[in-house]
């Protein structure tokens, strides 16, 4: 699967994308982008914590790890959507799975720290004039997260294609007709 295809398919399961497409108000769309970015950044912090927890307890279930990494990829993808950038513009570097997990967690924390400053009035990453610096820092942080994800995949003999395929398979099973709040809140047994 190509990364552009993944981005398109993955965002079918984003409530923010669905709301954005249904809204005809520029103001509402602006608020939806902000909510989508906030959801993605906080979600990325949460998902990277799950990856770090698996690595720290030496969990060897590679399929489970790939699914958790897929969730991280989804969060990075949603943040890229909210910022209006393509996911494939973020890629580079190499590490071990432990280093990648730690780097992913650290980068997600850095990105969350940037969002914290946004809430404190230090520029809006979705406002071209006011938030150019915050926007660039977010893009760099998301690029670092994506690179760490890719390296984590490689260290378990997988690649970004495997991760994207597995994540889309999971999302299509969970949300066959696009995002539904009910399906999000009440998942089937074994749906991680």
Image (cartoon, rainbow, N blue to C red):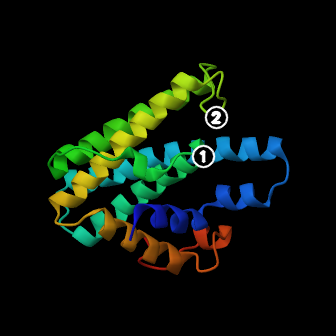
Residue 116 in picture, x, y percent from top left = 54, 28
* Residue at the spot 24% in from the left edge and 60% down from the top edge: 153
Residue 159, image quadrant: bottom left
Residue in the foreground of this view, choosing between 173 and 61: 173
Disc number placed over residue 126 in the picture, else none: 2
Quadrant housing the N terminus: bottom left
**Number of residue marks:** 2
Q: CA distance from mark 2 to mark 1?
A: 8 Å
Residue 144, image quadrant: top left
Q: Is residue 90 above or below residue 188?
A: above
Quadrant housing the C terminus: bottom left
Residue 126 in picture, x, y percent from top left = 64, 34
Question: Is the Cβ of the residue at disc 2 closer than 8 Å to that at disc 1?
Answer: yes
In the displayed structure image, the side of residue 146 where residue 117 appears, left or right: right
Question: Which residue in the protein does label 1 denote?
Answer: 82
* Residue at the spot 67% in from the left edge and 29% down from the top edge: 127
Q: Is residue 9 above or below residue 141?
A: below
* Residue at the spot 66% in from the left edge and 55% down from the top edge: 16
In the displayed structure image, the side of residue 114 where residue 159 appears, left or right: left
Chain-order first, disc 2 or disc 1: 1
């Amino acid at each position: 699967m190509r990364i552009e295809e993944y981005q398109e398919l993955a965002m079918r399961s984003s409530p923010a994308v669905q709301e954005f497409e249904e809204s005809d108000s520029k103001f509402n769309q602006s608020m939806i982008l902000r909510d989508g970015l906030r959801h993605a950044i906080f979600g990325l912090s949460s998902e990277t914590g799950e990856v770090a927890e698996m690595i720290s307890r030496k969990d060897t279930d590679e399929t489970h790890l790939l699914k958790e990494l897929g969730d991280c990829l989804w969060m990075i993808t949603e943040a890229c959507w909210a910022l209006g950038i393509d996911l494939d513009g973020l890629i580079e570097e190499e590490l071990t799975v432990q280093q990648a997990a730690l780097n992913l967690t650290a980068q997600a924390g850095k990105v969350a720290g940037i969002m914290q400053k946004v809430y404190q009035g230090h520029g809006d990453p979705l406002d071209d004039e006011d938030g150019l610096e915050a926007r660039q820092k977010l893009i760099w942080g998301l690029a670092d997260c994506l690179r760490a994800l890719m390296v984590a995949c490689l260290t378990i003999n997988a690649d970004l294609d495997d991760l994207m395929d597995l994540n889309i398979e999971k999302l299509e099973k969970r949300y066959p007709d696009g995002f539904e709040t009910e399906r999000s809140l009440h998942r089937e047994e074994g749906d991680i």
